[in-house]
Structures are given as C-alpha cells and as structure tokens.
Amino acid sequence: MSKKWRVAKALEQLLAELNSHAPNRSKASDGAIGDAAHASRTSDHNPWVDDGAMGVVTARDFTHDPAHGADMNKIVAHLVKLRDPRIKYIIWNWKMWRSYDKLGASAWTPTDYTGSNGHTKHAHVSVNSDKASYDSTATWGLSKGMVIVKDVAPSTDQSTSTPHSGPQTASRFEKYREGIELGSRNIKEGSAGNDVKWVQAALGVRADGYFGPITEDTVIHWQKAHKLTPDGIVGPMTWKALKAFMAPKNPNKPAPQQPNPQTPPAVSNTGFVKNGRTFLSQDGYPVFAQGYDGTTKRNEDWGSIVIASGTGRTVSAIGCAMTAVTMALSGITGKTITPDEMATFMKKKNGFGSGGDIQSWDLMGTLVSPQVDLFRKTGFKADQIDQELDAGRPVIVHVDYVTKNSAGKREGKYDGTGDHWFLVTGRSGNQYRANDPAGGNRLTLHRMTDGRLEADVATSKGTKYRTVGNAVTFSRGPAVRVADNKGQGSTPKASTGSATNVVVLKPAQNKAGSKVPSKSPLPNFAGADRAGTVKAIHDECLRQGVTMLEQIAYVLATVELETGHFQPIREADYLGARAEGYRKNNLRYYPYYGRGYVQLTWKTNYEKYGKLLGLDMVKTPDLALRPDVALFVLVHGMKKGTFTGVSLSTYINGSRVDFRGARAIINGSDKAAQCAGYAQKWLSTLKLKKVG
C-alpha cells in the first residue's frame, strides 16, 4: 500500500496495556492494516482517516489467548462495561457491540454479526474517526494482574494459530461489473457493480461498488424509514423508492439548457479591490487563482508561497482549498482578503501540516472579525447544497476528476476520491455557478440523477469535475452579515418552507400591534451567528440558574449535535423540498414535529410551553423556531426534565458528571458518545476562555 499510514494512538495505548496485562500472550492474530480484501471495501482496517499526509487506521485485532491471560471474553466484557467514548464498535465471537443505536438495537446491546469471519480467533476494536478519539492516550483500565469483569459469551474456537489476514471477504463478492442498468436486478450482500455503487452514493455510504455489511445495514435502516420491508435487499420496490428519492425536485419541469461552454455566467468586475487591483467577482464573491490566472495570463505572486514545510509544495500546487475559503470569506465580509494574507496567517498560526494539509479549517474563519465558523461535511449532495445557497451561504465542494496509475502518472479517470476544491457561489434551478481556484475560472455545473454535481465543461484531462460528498459550509453568508462592531448580527430573513434551516420569526403581536406578554420572561434574543448564539445560550443558562460549567457545556453540546449550525431548525430539514411530505406521511405527532435548538415534539409539549410563555404555540407551532422562544425552551426543558422526565442534574451534578448518560435528557442513547465528545470540548473551552 503506497499511502503512508499509522495506527490510531488510542489503539496503540490499548495494545500496550494488553501486553502489560498479558506479557506472554500470543500475537498470532493481532493485526491493524488490512489486506487486499479490506482495501477493496469499506473497512476501519484501511487508512481512510486523513491526518495531514498520513492515513490513520482506526481498527485493531487482538488475539484470543486465554491460556496466557488474553481471554477476549473477559477483555471485551471489560471494554463493553467501560463504554469508553472513543469506541466505535467491537466485534467478537459472532457478536457486535456498537456504541450507538442502530437498526432498533440500543447502544452496547450485543447483536449478531453477519460477516463471513466470526472473529473467533481475535477481537476487533474500532475507534471513532475524530482526532480527539482516535489519538487519545487515556488509559483503558487494563494492567498487569487486574481483576476483569465477568465473561461475555464463551468462544467456540480458542485456536490462535492463524495469522491475521482480515475477514475473508474477497471470495464472497461477485466480480465487479460496469454497465448494469439500474433496477435490472436485485442486489444484496455479496453483489458488486456500478448499480451497487449508485445505491451506496444515494444512501451516503462509501461508494466502492461492493455490497458489504455496512451497506446492508444502511439499506435496512433506509427501508425502515420509508416503510419498506427491511430485508437489506434492493429489490423492485426499494429500487422504485430510491429512484423517486433521488429524482430531481421538479421531474416534470424541462431541464434547463446547458450553457454554451464559451459563454461564462454573468459576472461583475467591480467590488473587490486590493493594492490598486480590481478582481472579477461572481455572485458577490471574488475570483482568485491559486497560481496561474487565465484572465491576466500570469502567475499570481502568492502562488510561490510554500505552505508544505515537509515537501516544499506551494499555494499554486496544493492551495486550492485555502484559496476557495479566502474567496468565501471575502464575499461574506465584503472585504477583500487575498490568498497571500490567508497563507501568511495560517503559517503564523501553524495551520498547515508538513504536507500542506489544513490542520484546522475553523482557524481560517478567525482571520476576519467577527469570525466566521466553518463546518466540514460528508454525504453532501445537491439538496444540502441547495439549502445552504438558498439561505445565502456559499459552499466549498471536493471534486473528483483524476486518478494516479501504478506509475504515479495522473490520468483522466474517476476513482471516487476528491482531487480538488472550489467554491459554489449560487444557482438557478438545476444549474450551479462556481469560482475555481485552478486558473481563476468561473464555471457552471448541473445536478446528476444521483444527487452529485458535475461540471458542464471537461477539464484538460478530459473528465468533468464531479462532487464526492465532502464539503465545507459557513455559519453565515453575504445575505446574513454580522456588524463589525457587534457580537450579534442582523436578523436573517424568515424562511418559507423547509429549504433552509435558518428560520427567524417576528415577535408575536396582539391586534393592537404590541407584543404578547409572556408569563415567563423570554430572553432578549433575535438570533445571531454561531459565536453570538453560543454566548446567548451561556447567558440564558445563567439567567435560568444553570451555573455549573459541566451542565452548560452539555447544553451547548446538545445544540451542536441537534442543529450543527447553531440555528433553530425543523425536524428532517436535511431532506430539503421533500421534508414536509416526509413529516406528514411518517411522523405520528405531525404538525407538532421537532423545532428549535432542541427538537420540541408532540402537541402536549407545545401546549405546555405555550401556556408557560403566554403564546399560542398550538395554533402557531412555528413559534418554537423563534430564537428567543427556542432559547428558553432549550434551557428550561433540559433543566426541568420536561422532554423525557430526566434533567441535567440527574446525570451532571456535584458528585457525578456522566456526559454519555445525559443523552437520556433528549433522546435515550442516540449518538450519546458523539454528544459526550462535544461536551468535553465545550467544557475545555468554558474553562479556558471563561465565556460570558
């Protein structure tokens, strides 16, 4: 495998502790990096997590050797009881323990493992893909001579003689085929081909074209959500539903004509000026080239700035992502920020790895004041891009257009891996406009049937840019600017429907036009960007008597998990134009579906808070989206235990801080580990920065 890789430090820590606990144990079935069978499919044994120029393997296998102290029945039982938030899942002896709810099974409940390798010779441990998890070297509680908890189910095979080669999956996949018509056959675990790849892309699974257990799990979950037989087989009914799900929003509307490749979209050549130079712009964003500029026919001076200390590579060679962010921030703030300023800033802040990779995307947003928050996204397709653009926010997308052959030469072929970044600035129907750092070009794209975007004009390699699902979004856009001298900005326009997740309503009024009095005083909050909302949440916690830093951290973590953008949202808004139909057809509590910073559901809860606040929330449930109302409900509900009967003080108090268990305040154990991780980070922030 040519890519440089290493094993997650958390797993190396576990290995060291196991070796200390059982120094004479066999290591015959130990393993980290996968074999060829793993490389052909989705697996945590592959170095798929990027940490700079290095790939990180987030799984390890540990040999079962009870005769020498490495009894995986006991080790796994210990880890399951420990419920360490770093763990993603464990596989041992035909059983699987996930740290999250899946397919109706609660987190940490053992389920049958259906892969071809039952993991009877070794236990498999995967850790989460965020750096705080996979590189944490906190102890796992194993030590020499320790007393381990009661066994899990005994293994039926205690042999340790077979070296690790990974699950024996190569033979159970049929030969991969191209040219298969979508829907022409039933596909299930073991199938391979372009139709499998299409389904994986539609469902947000890594599209490698091989139908394995992860794809099967995702299909089952999707079938359940769409009231189909959850058998994990993509048959006629599932094909029909998937095609309808992925169809353009207005299938009966004629597709817009593709633009003439020789005619660029309408642009302006005014508005962005720096050092006497005026830059072209599109949709309110300047057009910067990372190196050679096709308009001026010269190389930009900033293109020669070295940003990769280990390789000497420059902005011109690998600075597309940074240049795209610079264009976005210039448009958002209305100030001209050039790539040389960003490169200098990032180098000063150690924002680049030795290979030139961006260590912290969020750091770039701190160059402007007030700062702009950046969010890395996966599984981002046209519907999600539409939501951002319709809300006035730009989107940076990762695109595929080349691959390297065995000799390292770049060929014009697709391999599903992102090769380049550029900025999507706007759209008209199914036609999208973008600024491309490669050459400082303006380009147009169209929506493909599977939800990806594809450029209208081919590159010099003969292929067209195709999005791969990786994206970067922003906490605001030019239409929602924040005043330079204030922590809170202007109020975004109210949303119509569910195309955007930013909804701000005017304060309720009576017939005379005055504000409706509230029985409980509402906070004076009309909405803000991420930083302003974080401060408002902190202040509202204090106002309602939530003063313990650990509790405030968990409230902030909950909003981050539930909304992502720290803006009031509607339940299932990620479905875009299909969201309202989904709510009507699938939610028993419609129209009282989830709204706000935390999802307020059911009519009884709308009645309860309506009476408490003196607002008719039953008649107008969208009041739950009003920032001041959403803020009050968030803190009050978590403090009082209104949502589930469990309150903040149940899990977080003077003698106990259980961030993982606290998820029960909102939604059982769903994404409990993820929320706990957010809480730990917020707690560090609160302690260091003394927010508020």
Image: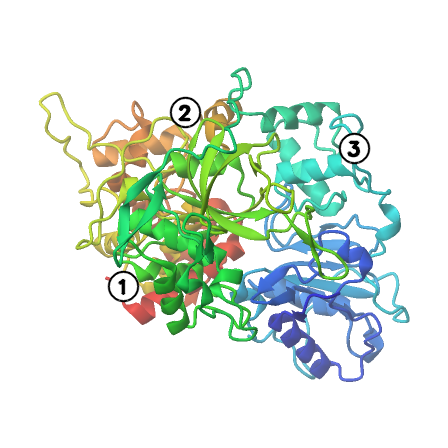
Few, some or many C-alpha atoms within 10 Å of disc 2 (few <14, some 14-19, many ≥20)?
some
The amino acid marked with disc number 3 is Gly
For the point 61% across and 23% down, the residue is 244
The amino acid marked with disc number 2 is Pro
* Figure check: 51 above or below 668: below
Per the image, the residue denoted by label 1 is 691
* Picture quarter with the C terminus: bottom left
Q: Earlier in the sequence, mark 3 or mark 2?
A: 3
Per the image, the residue denoted by label 3 is 179
The amino acid marked with disc number 1 is Val
In this view, the residue in front, 412 or 66, is 412
Residue 312 x %, y %: 53, 73
* Mark 3 or 1, closer to the camera: 3
In which image quadrant can residue 644 be found? top left
For the point 60% across and 29% down, the residue is 246
In this view, the residue in front, 479 or 234, is 479
Per the image, the residue denoted by label 2 is 591
